[in-house]
Image (tube, rainbow, N blue to C red):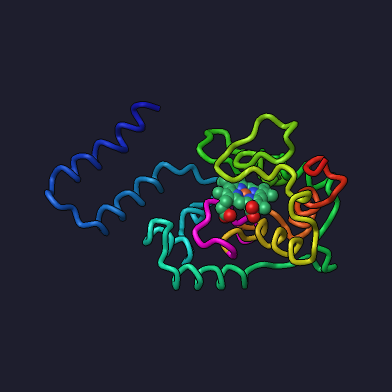
Amino acid sequence: MKYATMTLIAPLVVTLAGCATPDASDTDALVARYIAQSWLPGDNQPLERLRQDETQMECSKYRNNPPPAVARAIEAREAARIKYPADGKLMGDWKVGEKIAKAGNAMRVGKVEPDDPKRDPGGNCYACHEIDKKEVAAGNLGPSLAGYGKLRGSSDAIVRYTYGKIYNAMAFSACSNMTRFGVHGILTPEKVAHITAYLLDPASPVNR
Ligand code: HEC
């Protein structure tokens, strides 16, 4: 492991030391090459996942802080990518949603033994959010969602926002650090609807 890290870093250091002012695009290309070399492609983990789409390229260019006009353009483009369930119901079953929100056991990277590709990916929401306060293993990269539905109610506008946010976070905040679950095919529209119910249903433990 240590040896592998050194072999990756050593040429980079030599290259950077060799020229007083390295050209930024050369450095970017070099970094991209080393990242690609360290990736372990497999089922569900194609190298394709490293290729940035237009939005990610713009976010990288502006270091996740795009000027307002660019941010609005990103949000409009991402909003157009939101898909809705065939039956039009944006609120599913909170009990199913709870299981999906808690499941974080697929599509993991950096493991020598890849995850079983047949494993159904979950949302892994707790990696970044506190949601049900009884669950103590929660991350804090995102805001706490405890009592989410109790605080906001469940008007059509809130249901639509919550569904859309989970499907594609960047439709509402360009360059968000939250995964675009629907866009990347991690969650289907039906799964997003179940999680929407988990956050909004008054009977869900999130709101009790
Ligand atoms: C990689 C970290 C990460 C993951 C995983 C993640 N989120 Fe987020 N989430 C964030 C961040 C950061 C924000 C705040 C920035 C923003 O609004 O985009 C956020 C914001 C939100 C908001 C908006 C809150 C508000 O006050 O309006 C909702 C709702 C939400 N997340 C739900 C979820 C759900 C449900 C999941 C699981 C399917 C999830 N998130 C997974 C990082 C994450």
Q: Is residue 130 in view?
A: yes
Residue 117 image point, x, y percent: 66, 44
Looking at the image, the residue that sits furthest to the top is: 2
Residue toward you, 132 or 110: 132
Residue 85 image point, x, y percent: 78, 65
Report the residue at 63% width, 42% height from top.
Answer: 129
Quadrant the C terminus occupies: top right
Judged left or right of residue 94, residue 13 is: left
Q: Which residues, given as a range, are shown in magenta?
A: 171-183
Report the residue at 67% width, 56% height from top.
Answer: 166
Residue 145 image point, x, y percent: 68, 45
- Residue 182 forms part of the magenta stretch: yes
- Which image quarter: residue 135? top right
Judged left or right of residue 63, residue 206 is: right
Report the residue at 25% width, 42% height from top.
Answer: 12
Residue toward you, 52 or 33: 52
Q: In this rendering, is residue 67 above or below 100?
A: below
